[in-house]
Amino acid sequence: MTTAPKIPALNIGSHDLPVSPALDAFMGTRWAATPLPADDRVAGYEVMPARRARLAAAFPGERLIVPAGQLKVRSNDCDYRFRPHSAYAWLTGLTGEEQVGHVLVVEPSGEPVLYLRPRSPRGGGSPYGSEFYRDRRYGEFWVGRRADLGEAAQLTGLRTEHLDDLEKLLTGHQPATRVLTGVDPVLDAATGRPRAEDTDRDTRLAAVLAELRLVKDAWEIEQLQHSVDLTVAGFADVVRALPTALRHARGERWLEGTFNQRARAEGNGTGYETIVASGAHACVLHWIRNDGALDPSKLLLLDAGVETDTLYTADITRTLPLGGTFSPVQRQVYELVLAAQDAGIATLRPGASFRDFHRAAMRVIAGGLADWGVLRISAEEALHQDSGLFRRYTLCSTGHMLGLDVHDCAKARAETYLDGVLEEGQVLTVEPGLYLQPDDETLPLELRGLGVRVEDDLVITADGARLMSGALPRSVAAIEEWMGTLLG
């Protein structure tokens, strides 16, 4: 006895027009073949097999399941733009919006298999025959073309299977299995996650997937440098847009749009929500409302990064004088933060503790605050673990790993990352800041409402670190000259 194929439910809006049998039949006829070019490959095709082999070697004899993720509703029947999970992208090279619901399975033998929703046929009696023009979430006429099974195999070098077959794979007796959980609720439900007995196993998979990405290969460093270069161009766009933005009631948003245009035109978009913080808004660490006006007597804190089509992102911050030149007090604060960044960068080398650059930067910050009389105790006292009073003015840490995620490798165990040592090929940010709140009565009036951060991206080399974002000026004089040149 055979079972009829399960007809997938179409994602059809309640206001869609009905489709007659005649129209459905007509829609299924006379379509020309449109195969992908035979030489198409994912970017980084050559480096992907070694990544998958390293993952399989970490868990011999086990099944490993890494999903791309599912769509998330933004409003009613509108979804957020989809981006596949970074671990999935790192293992497959597939980075597009059409990867919704797809799953990479590494079998106990070590063979990787990609389960995907292939391009649906057009008519011909298939249960998927009307998806291409009727399904708002997955139909080709609505959201664009997907690869078929053969094309996906060609693109990735992976064995490919229909996503519908994943349910059968997960039925019956199962080998030891680990799942990257919290990414795809459909998959979590199908595998019975979370179960108490699986929690530790799955957490270990997430940690290893992060730790395998801590050291970047040469191809990844090229992608990150490309992202940095695009971001530098976006910062220049913002400066050129200042005259118009200064006249706009929500100048911050004008500048946000200016940078984001560069990111979407030349990359996949931004790697995170762009921070455009003028005046006291710069004292809000993750200010993304960006709804303020611009005052030429104030500073602008711009924290932004272009995400490449391969999903690697830069993360750069500059604090700029909106009028083109720093006032004496703005210069005072800026130069302290820059000195702290210089001190942090000077510690970067293979074998150094990851926390060394933060400690070095904070010694400079605490010393400056004490010299200004802001701290009523010595810098040494403020830096003591039992005190930390200097942190009132600089709450966050001084940097993080960078890669496919802006805060990359966050699931790595502390001993391999936060409490670990630096290695050649790691890419990170160094970003000290001072956030002098406008209502802070411990501060003299002239310092209140000033927020300054200087952030750069660096790659650890054999004998130190290379400043990837060095094309953007950092010193007061260089920033003023750069802005003057761009503004004419």
Image (tube, rainbow, N blue to C red):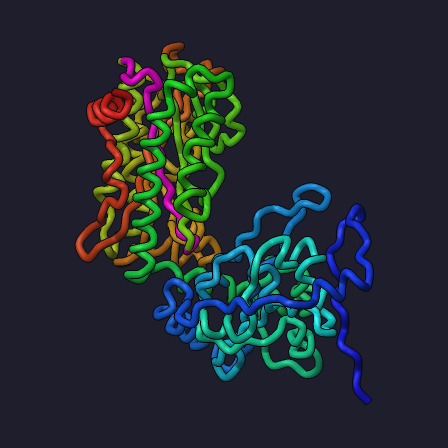
Q: Position of residue 483 (x, y in %)?
A: 27, 24
Q: Which of the 4 image quadrants contains residue 221?
A: bottom left
The magenta span reads 310-327
From this view, report whether residue 31 is shown above or below residue 432. Answer: below
Q: Residue furthest top?
A: 445
Out of 74 and 15, give the one closest to the viewer.
15
Q: Residue 212's x, y, as percent?
A: 40, 64
Q: Residue at x 32, y 28 (%)?
A: 366
Is 327 on the left-hand or right-hand side of 156? Answer: left
Quadrant assignment, res 231: top left
For the residue pair 471 and 467, the one nearer the viewer reads as 471
Q: Quadrant of the C terminus?
A: top left
Q: In this rendering, is residue 264 above or below 29?
A: above
Is 162 left, or right, of 287 in this rendering?
Answer: right
Position of 482 relative to 466 (above/below): above
Q: Name the one closer to the observer, 146 or 339.
A: 146
Q: Is residue 412 magenta?
A: no
Main SS of the magenta part reads loop
Judge whether residue 58 can be spotted in this image.
no
Residue at screen point 65% across, 78% down: 169
In this picture, residue 180 sits left or right of residue 86: right
Farthest-out residue, left: 463
Residue 386 position by quadrant? top left
Figure quadrant of the N terminus: bottom right
Q: Is residue 346 above or below residue 71?
A: above
Question: Residue 311 magenta-drawn?
Answer: yes
Q: Position of residue 47 (x, y in %)?
A: 35, 69
What count of labels does the image hold? Answer: 0
Can you give x and y, in whole percent of width and height, for residue 478 in the image? 21, 27
Q: Does any portion of residue 400 appear in the rendered image? A: yes
